[in-house]
Amino acid sequence: MPADLRQAPRGPRYAARDAVDFVIVGAGAAGSVVARQLARAGFRLVVLEQGPFLGTSDFKHDEIGVLNLHALTNDFRVLPNSLQLGPAATPRRTAAVLYGRVVGGGPVHFTANYWRFHEIDFIERSVRGAISGTGFADWPITYADLEPYYTMAEWELGVSGLAGASPFDPPRSKPYPLPPLPIKSSGVLFDRGAKKLGWHPFPAPMAILSKPYRGRSPCAQCGFCEGFGCEFGAKSSPLPTMIPQALATGKCEIRPGSYVRKIETDDAGRVTGVKYFDASRKEIYQRAKAVVVCANGAETPKLLLMSKSNRFPDGLANSSGLVGRYFMPNGGAMVGGLFDHEVNGYKGAHVSRILHDFYELDPKLGLQGGGGIDARWDLYPIGFGLFGLPLEGPQWGREWKRQLRQAFTRSLYALAHSTSLPIESNRVSLDPELKDAWGLPGIRLTYLDDPRDLALYQFFADRSDELLQAAGATKTWRYPLETPFPANHLLGTCRMGNDPSTSVTDKFHRAHDVPNLFLVSGASFVTSGRGQPTETIQALAFRAGVEITRLAGEHAL
């Protein structure tokens, strides 16, 4: 057994034969929050996580080991995917979905953009009307329902930002707990260009500490942020926040290296526990009174589809037939700019300025959705050599090396984050032929960009290009608009709603078909939002923890 699994603190030890109150599948953005909430309420729970339990001393600035060899994410060599570009296309084995596979999940290695959704994201169907050929719908909750939990997420985790800095911000009950991170040179250029165009840049809200907070150190500006764990504990992931608090209750056991293969049910259709493989690939059946699946928008539908039985022949909680459907990855556009002076964007946290002028677009433009744009640098030396230079230039040789030396310190990227439409045929399913290292079906992602999404991405590419030129770029270049794979915003595959025929869970994340099964992750999303889902995932998780506690207290599970 690897040392990180053997030595990590895991909390109490519960016997597999004894039914704990809850099994939580996944210790990431949502699962860690739900665990902390339920453990603090006094429930006995086991959290099963596929990946290792790492500490700050385990995080290295090793571009190949971390990014290419998947130290913190799913490894396609053992968990293969297939990708089908539209229902009529031939599937091919390739990296299709990317997610955190470590205690703490995706926030351990994310960029740390931490945006709230706005009011429009929850009621856009009512405001804008139906969109043909889509599952476009209102959420069963509103921004006002979630606002207290957005605030809770920001204060419990530690978020740096400036309330009221954007004229487009939704209402909030409290300011951010910490001031913004220092502006970078890239942020200064972004700010200059945006204001020249009459736009409204503002300090990016980031789940990174700008000052000491609750015993944690602030950002050391090391520059190894997106894709990497923070060795200082400054990134406000669950690892230095929610996980220690859950363990401190003495009620929560975390079992890393645990790969859940099936949720078991009884003849009455109630969940009785889960079967999983431990780190030595021994199968264990952990009994539980209820199960909360927090395994992201790809692994959640996969697990439900693998959990079919005589009572649930199409997969668990799938009477609607919608488990896995309406996959949304968030879209956008990326434009690079070269300046005649040093920018040195590789230093410090990747993002310091964003704008939301195009969060809600004028309907007269004929575009669906909206989004935001940030100024960033999230490439490292090897990755920059592969992807950072203009695509039409030399890709090898002396001239390529010369450009590489010059451009590494003088480039800036504008990245747009936007909506993607919920299309029923865009889905996560089980590949009928591809098997993983445990002999279980691999994930098949069927996805095709909708032309209306591509038109939106083109709009944002044009705005991003315009912004970089206004900021003084001497050269700009664009990257392909089509959704890049592997996708890492995995949304919408087990949507919430009031009608069991058109959704998988109710507004409290309870499966319509199974009273003691809850699904809490990006899979719950009804629409994709404007590109940064993590804060909404965690706000939903705080809310779910409160509601599950209420239901358990009322003996309603």
Image: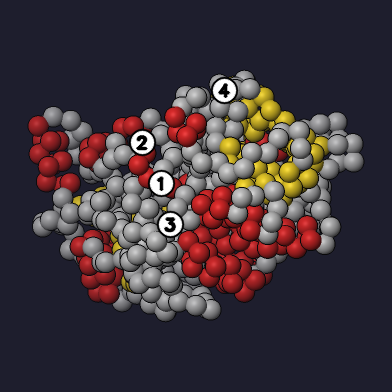
SS state under label 1: loop
Q: Looking at the image, tell me whether mark 4 or mark 3 is earlier in sequence order.
A: 3
Residue 454 horizontal/vertical position (percent): 47, 51
Give residue 66's mark: 2
Would you name the residue on which mark 4 appears?
Answer: 280
Would you name the residue on which mark 3 appears?
Answer: 236
Q: Tell which of 509 and 496 is nearer to you.
A: 509
Residue at 37% in and 39% down: 58
Drawn side of residue 267 relative to residue 403, left or right: right
**Residue 4 visible in the picture:** yes
> Which numbered disc, 1 or 3, marks the residue closer to the eye?
3
Q: Are marks 1 and 2 in contact (CB under 8 Å)?
A: yes
Residue at 42% in and 64% down: 214
Crowd class of label 3 (few under 14; some 14 to 19; many from 20; radius 10 Å): many
Crowd class of label 2 (few under 14; some 14 to 19; many from 20; radius 10 Å): some
Task: Check disc 4 and give the amino acid type.
Answer: Ser
Residue 147 horizontal/vertical position (percent): 58, 72
Residue at 20% in and 62% down: 185
Whole-number angstrom distance, CA of label 2 to CA of label 4:
23 Å
Q: Looking at the image, tell me whether mark 1 or mark 4 is earlier in sequence order.
A: 1
Task: Check disc 1 and give the amino acid type.
Answer: His
SS state under label 4: loop
